[in-house]
Amino acid sequence: MAAEQSVRSPQTPATASGDTRIHNIGYRSYDGPRLGRSYARLSLYSQSLRGSYGLGRSVKSKVLPMLLFVVMCVPAAIMVAVSVATKAGDLPVDYTRYAIIMQAVISLYVASQAPQSVSRDLRFKTVPLYFSRPIETSDYVRAKYAALASALFILTASPLLVLYIGALLAELDFADQTKGFAQGLVSVALLSLLFAGIGLVIASVTPRRGFGIAAVIAVLTISYGAVSTLQAIADVQGSGGSIAWIGLFSPVTLIDGVQSAFLGASSTFPGGVGPSNAEGVVYVLFSLGLIAACYGLLMRRYKKVGL
Amino acid sequence: MYDPTVARLTYRALLGRRRALILGALPLLLVVISLAVRGLAGADDQTAADVLGGLALATMVPIIGVIAGTGAIGPEIDDGSVVYLLSKPIKRPTIIYTKLIVAIAVTMVFSAVPTLIAGFVLNGNGRQVAVAYTVAALVASIAYAALFLLLGTVSRHAVVLGLVYALVWEALFGSLVPGARTLSVQQWSLAVAQKVSGGELVTSDVSLTTGTVLLVAVTVLATWYAGRKLRTLTLAGEE
């Protein structure tokens, strides 16, 4: 091509007839199988899920999620060891109670991994690149939501599995333990969906990872602190009826209310009285509504972003 | 030692656009909760001390401190725009000192002022509770800002580390292991508050001397080391 250009003299106008031609330099179109939209969505899901534990990323970014995972599981292992050694008739902690006790670790995990999952796509403007593939807004949102919820489920269900296996090894009552384990799994599944939704909604607003982390942790801890303070005061003041209604306003007490109403958990509310069955229905509807609202907000957010 | 231009840029980075709203939401929530508590329980000194100690000093001040302290320098280092600041003929310790002043000011405004308002709402400053916790919040603001500013220069996961310190070390270990309380900004500032209030409702696990010495030492050392760290800063790529 260089040779042809050098042949053409500078005086000749570029539009001279007979001098312009299109070269076939050998590009070929792709005619193999196309994996399509569902495959792209699945890839996005699996990559996001792996990324939540730092797999496929640098060593530095593996440290925190793995550390939180270990911190989450070690107390369960210790409890199992203690109950086996002392030949206690039951585990020291209910399956449903475990996530409530470890809520600080779960909150830290959501706060660190939700911005990791979505904020960097916003900051480096890679979102339009995703949408240049055959995926839609809903695919992106569903893949990210499902990935973070699955990562959270792994985080919260693994210690329960440790407790369950330990309880079976200690030859505790099989039917009783299986029932408790199943109830615990339902409870942490709901918790995973709720926390993942809240975390992603907040994180998707800011392209700054740091602000995202602080905002998620602030929403989770301050709402819990505020609600439990108000509940404690309502308990002291003897207005026990309002305790359950106050509990609706923070994610942790919401889960606590649902599981103490329907999943046989003992409530951690002040006074130890969880919501009644009628109030429990409100709790369930409220949590499901919150999850749906988070999904809706994410869809609305990504309708506009970067395009 | 204080550079007005750096200060103006840092204020803009911290409070620009919608960030002031996010920072303002927490103090607003505290005041709303105090109003609700006052409505539910009436004016009660013990309740006021519980709310201010549990919610304001233990949760709100550290979180505001993390946001302001790491936000003053963290994002700049993260996206690499700090090189434009470092290439100007300004001493690195001056940059740190200026950013520290800004971080302290922001933390104080968004944590101590609402604490005072909440205290007056809760029990009208009965038995000096409001003033004592405000002093504690002011003192804690300085130490938190210095500490988290240092974290911002040291690690790119400064926010997480800061929150782990504030929530896991101070709140969780502090309530389980008595020894952890000696090494807690919250307890040091409570020691100062105890002196102010006369020491019935506001109590601390460390003595006033220990608390003050440690507060000053942590603030000075953190600022000095952050300045030093900024002189040898290496800019890493994104993970």
Image (spheres, coloured by chain):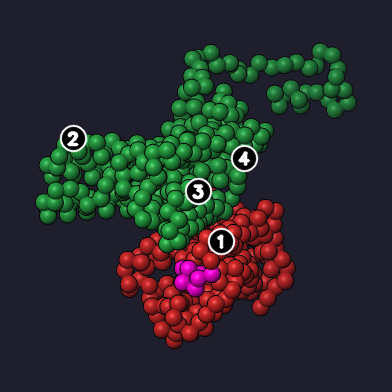
Chain colours: A green, B red
Closer to the camera: disc 1 or disc 4? 1
Is residue B80 covered in magenta? no
Residue highlighted by disc 2: A175
User: Does the CB distance between marks 1 and 2 fall below 8 Å?
Assistant: no
Q: Is residue A263 visible?
A: yes
Circle 1 sits on which residue?
Answer: B39
Specify whether B184 is left or right of B179: right
Q: CA distance from mark 1 to mark 4?
A: 48 Å
Q: Residues within 10 Å of mark 4 (few under 14, many from 20)?
A: some
What is the x, y in percent for residue A245? 48, 47
Asked if residue B96 shows in the view, the reply is: no
Of B214 and A160, which appears nearest the observer? A160
Which of the pair A89/A119 is nearer the observer? A89
Density class for disc 2 (Cα within 10 Å; few <14, some 14-19, many ≥20) is few
Q: Label 1, label 2: how many angstroms apart (C-alpha)?
A: 48 Å
Residue at 18% x, 43% y is A167
Quadrant of image for the N terminus of chain A: top right
What residue is shown with label 3?
A249
Residue at the far front in the pictured view: A238
Give the residue type that dot 4 points to.
Answer: Lys
Q: Secondary structure at mark 3?
A: helix
Question: Are the two marked residues, 2 and 4, in contact with CB atoms closer than 8 angstroms?
Answer: no
